[in-house]
Amino acid sequence: MSSAKRTGSQASVPHVADSHDLIRVHGARENNLKDVSIEIPKRRLTVFTGVSGSGKSSLVFNTIAAESQRLINETYSAFVQGFMPTLARPEVDILEGLTTAIIVDQQRMGADPRSTVGTATDVNAMLRILFSRLGEPHIGPPSAYSFNTASVRASGAITVERGNKKAVKATFERTGGMCTRCEGRGSVSDIDLTQLYDDSKSLAEGAFTIPGWKSDSQWTVQVYAQSGFVDPDKPIREYTEKQLRDFLYGEPVKVKVNGVNLTYEGLIPKIQKSFLSKDKEAMQPHIRAFVERAVTFTVCPECDGTRLSEGARSSKIGKISIADACAMEIRDLAEWVRDLDEPSVAPLLGALRDALDSFVEIGLGYLSLDRPAGTLSGGEAQRVKMIRHLGSSLTDTTYVFDEPTIGLHPHDIQRMNDLLLRLRDKGNTVLVVEHKPEAIAIADHVVDLGPGAGTAGGTVCFEGTVEELRAGDTVTGRHLDDRAVLKDTVRKPTGALEIRGATTHNLQGVDVDVPLGVLCVVTGVAGSGKSSLIHGSVPAGADVVSVDQSPIKGSRRSNPATYTGLLEPIRKAFAKANGVKPALFSANSEGACPTCNGAGVIYTDLAMMAGVAAPCEDCEGKRFQPSVLEYRFGGRDISEVLAMSVAQAEEFFGSGEARTPAAHKILDRLADVGLGYLTLGQPLTTLSGGERQRLKLATHMGDKGGVYVLDEPTTGLHLADVEQLLGLLDRLVEAGKSVIVIEHHQAVMAHADWIIDLGPGAGHDGGRIVFEGTPADLVADRATLTGEHLAAYVGA
């Protein structure tokens, strides 16, 4: 085989196309970034570090990834762009060398009751095709195996407009796999009527006890009162049988209320549509409390929780139905698929095997396809999103990860690191926002942002290798080799929370005494049963305060002052000092600027182009009417107070004429969790993941519970912030609280008074207690994976 010889001069001159090996960012000003200019090497693994709120996500996600996404969207036709989210160009002067960005973030997966791991990853779609081809008896096309598709039958005349118009008789039939009893949800609800209304009262007397239904002027209440089906002045218990049936189960029908056409519907279907069609986790706390009080969810007796019709469950390959396949742990399902040998569906089996193997490879083999997507943790959701990219043949793309080690035991972090390096070695640019030293250690290039958070951050403090970072004088460099030490003495428990025979999810009849009055850490590999044990067995009653990883819900009108309840005492203080109504001091109520409705900006919608937001000219972005800004308290108007940082406001409301104890108490808690730099009026949508988690913790610290259950509070925390968190946990325990922490971070384990370790593996290989005792005993034993990693961490 011959090959043409190249001359030395040709070989030494690089091709001009090879000169684009950097992503150049110049003058980035998104959120708190201060004219950041930086060059990021392509086809390398770059880790972005810095304290929570220093601007990492603003640079990586809101600038680089957002612009890449926007430019790709612009390649589509205007018609297609009309259906896509419109993205504004980031605040940056120059962005060069961008490649297609694939974003793998921590956003929880859709909490729709019908969304499962299988539907979210398209594995269910492949299984449905497989069963529609090989299942015996054959019951129909892939839709016949789908719990999201209802069976439909129709017949009648249709008019075909072609030449001579002619009515043609037609029938239509579609076979779906949805269980008709639970409508594909897997559970049915039983509603306690005594929680919906007081039957000794009439509707006119305010019989309804449903949240938001108490006001007589409320439209929903008026529909029932003026429907003509019931007497609004008669107590509900005196209704005739027909009136009660119409009141509870009436079919939807149009009625006129105060001259307006509205739809009347029985109370039970109304409650099912307005409350039970949503996932409980996505509800506001008071609505969730009502649903938990009024509704009992039980496994659907008809489909036994599989969500599927009898026909879909009867069709089998060998002895396995699609319901059995979805209930298996994914690693067992992968073995079953590997044993199928059917040449007629060979390409499908190959794709299905690859997808299932990706689950196992990424450490999620313990999940099952029928697991509701809303129950996955942030780390699990992120890894599920990674699956579709693992076997991808794409190269020269930019993969953007947001703390991929979240929710991972130290044992699993090495596996995640291998995956990131594999993506890089295929010729991709990998950008990772990360805090864990084990993940920073594998970086080819490190960018450290800071030096502080919020307004004290937003600049690049360091660029270079990991070794240069260690030697550098930045917050991250100084804390990179920080190691917590085991405590000399541990606190003695004041009691115990007894858990007996716990069987939630994969727990195998666990008996354990969780000590009270101390800092107790529950640990174990991902999927070992930690959350199942604590959240499933410790009832969230009056004495238990649970701070989980569920995201904070909030629009750009929400801010730390509204979310924590801080605005309430501030408004009252302003109102009392000026002799006016408190509602004037809310930008979402009477005090709002009429031009921008209290938003501070005017939005101009440009259809498929990005909308433009310009500061409101009337209020100059202050959000309030000019007359409201004339009222002062402590020498400041309400817009100046909302522009203060937590630390400034703490001083302002702590003494002098502006002293407001109720506000000062909330500000103290915010400062305690390390959020002293946040401004009170900063929109929640601009907060980082770590900031939101701590904001939620600060809010719950005001709850009057004796037991605090925290789910991975180190999520999104920089190494320097973990120290502050440990101090906060100590203060809670010293104040007489019991603190139970589900955690993987070795610093928290080392600081614990008592450790409960679950395992030894994940899924059906876990669900057992493998160690109970002090951290020192765990290190001395080294009998578990956690013990080995903790011993290596503390240098024992």
Image (spheres, grey):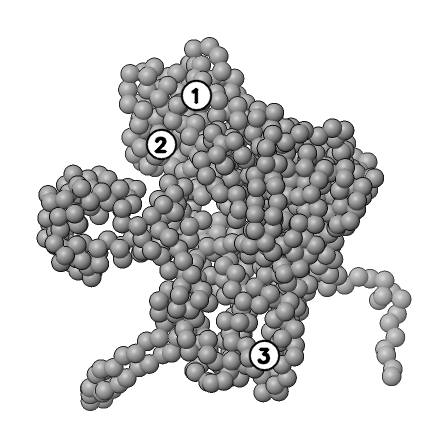
The local secondary structure at tag 1 comes to: helix
Question: What residue is drawn where x is 69% and y is 43%?
Answer: 772
Type of residue at label 3? Leu
The percent coordinates of residue 727 (x first, y second) are: 64, 28
Q: Mark 3 or 1 closer to N-term?
A: 3
On the rendered structure, is 431 left or right of 542? right
Residue 100 left/right relative to 704: right
Vertical comparison of 408 with 35: above or below: below
Q: Which amino acid does label 1 sit on?
A: Ala
Task: Say what amino acid the circle numbered 2 marks.
Answer: Ala
First in sequence: mark 1 vs mark 2: 2
Q: Which residue is drawn at 61% across and 40% down?
A: 514
Quadrant in which residue 346 is drawn: bottom right
Dot placed on the residue nearer the N-terminal end, 2 or 3: 3
Where, quadrant-wise, is the C terminus in this rendering?
top right
Question: What's the distance in space between the residues labelled 1 and 2, CA to CA?
Answer: 21 Å
Q: Residue 587 carries which label?
A: 2
Q: Distance between the residues labelled 2 and 3?
A: 56 Å
At a point 57% along the width and 26% down the height, the residue shown is 736
Looking at the rendered image, the quarter that the N terminus falls into is: bottom right
Looking at the picture, how far across and down is residue 657, in whole percent?
43, 10
Residue 362 vertical position relative to residue 196 in the rendered view, above or below: below
Which label is found at residue 386?
Answer: none
Residue 348 numbered tag: 3
Question: What residue does disc 1 label?
Answer: 662
**Which residue ends up furthest to the bottom in the rendered image?**
164
